[in-house]
Image: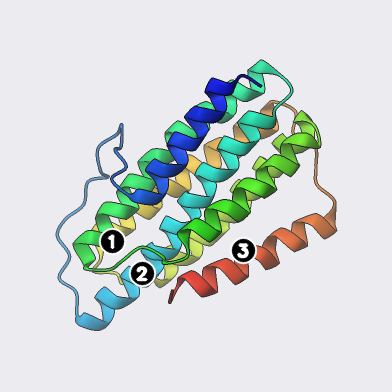
């Protein structure tokens, strides 16, 4: 693996963790939100969890790109990571609007996800794609749950989450189209348990 790709990955990690991500697409359009303090707090907690998911997505895609065996998959992972930057920037901006902070544990989430991404990549390209497919399916379900929990008055947050859900479904479809191998049930379960720990922690920390 060329050194410049590792350097670029390290640069992306710093950008992810220090804030200030820039979206290529405009923030999904929505009206203003007139929220009570309790609704604002709930939206902030849910968007913080979604932001952590995007921090992890950057780590996973960067690591899987670095460890991919084919140039085609490496480029696919790099494109997906670039698309996910939009989600990172959108959730970051919405958190600021809500007066909420990002997770204090973002460096830990990034490091853990990066390690998992390397393992998935080293297992082989079909398994790496299988990991993407399962991850994106679980994220899509997670976002659907957040749409159920977000205050109905919080149109800006809902618009962001709805567009993220659409994009994640497209990433899952692309992974399946490119030959993703189905993951064994125990691995899927372990992924769900790990995601549950992360989401429940990030809701508060």
> What's the residue at 76%, 56% (across, down)?
188
Q: Which mark is residue 81?
A: none
Q: Quadrant of the N terminus?
A: top right
* Residue 73 percent across, percent down from the top left: 65, 23
Q: Which mark is residue 195?
A: 3
Q: Can you tell which quarter of the image residue 130 is in?
A: top right
Q: Who comes first in sequence, dot 1 or dot 3?
A: 1
Disc tally is: 3
Judging by the rendered image, the residue that carries numbered circle 2 is 150
* Residue 166 percent across, percent down from the top left: 46, 43
Q: Is residue 179 above or below residue 123?
A: above
Label 1 to label 3: alpha-carbon separation:
21 Å
> What's the residue at 33%, 58% (across, down)?
158
**Residue 140 in view:** no
Judging by the rendered image, the residue that carries numbered circle 1 is 95
**Residue 139 in view:** yes
Label 3 to label 2: alpha-carbon separation:
19 Å
Q: Can you tell which quarter of the image residue 20 is in?
A: top left
At label 3, counting other C-alpha atoms closer than 10 Å, the crowd grade (few under 14, some 14-19, many 20 or more) is: some
């Amino acid at each position: 693996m060329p050194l410049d790709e590792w350097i670029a990955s390290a640069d992306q990690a710093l950008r992810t963790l220090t804030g200030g991500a820039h979206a290529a697409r405009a923030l999904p359009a929505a009206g203003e939100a007139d929220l009570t303090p309790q609704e604002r707090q709930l939206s902030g907690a849910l968007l913080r969890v979604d932001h952590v998911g995007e921090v992890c997505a950057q780590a996973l895609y960067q690591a899987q790109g670095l460890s991919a065996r084919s140039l085609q998959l490496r480029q696919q992972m790099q494109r997906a990571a670039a698309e996910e930057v939009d989600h990172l920037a959108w959730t970051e901006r919405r958190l600021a609007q809500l007066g909420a902070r990002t997770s204090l544990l973002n460096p830990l989430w990034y490091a853990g996800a990066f390690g998992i991404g390397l393992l998935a990549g080293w297992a082989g390209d079909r398994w790496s794609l299988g990991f993407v497919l399962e991850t994106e399916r679980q994220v899509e379900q997670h976002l659907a749950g957040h749409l159920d929990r977000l205050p109905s008055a919080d149109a800006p947050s809902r618009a962001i989450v709805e567009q993220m859900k659409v994009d994640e479904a497209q990433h899952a479809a692309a992974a399946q189209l490119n030959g993703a191998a189905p993951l064994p049930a125990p691995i899927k379960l372990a992924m769900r348990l790990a995601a549950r720990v992360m989401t429940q922690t990030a809701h508060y920390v």
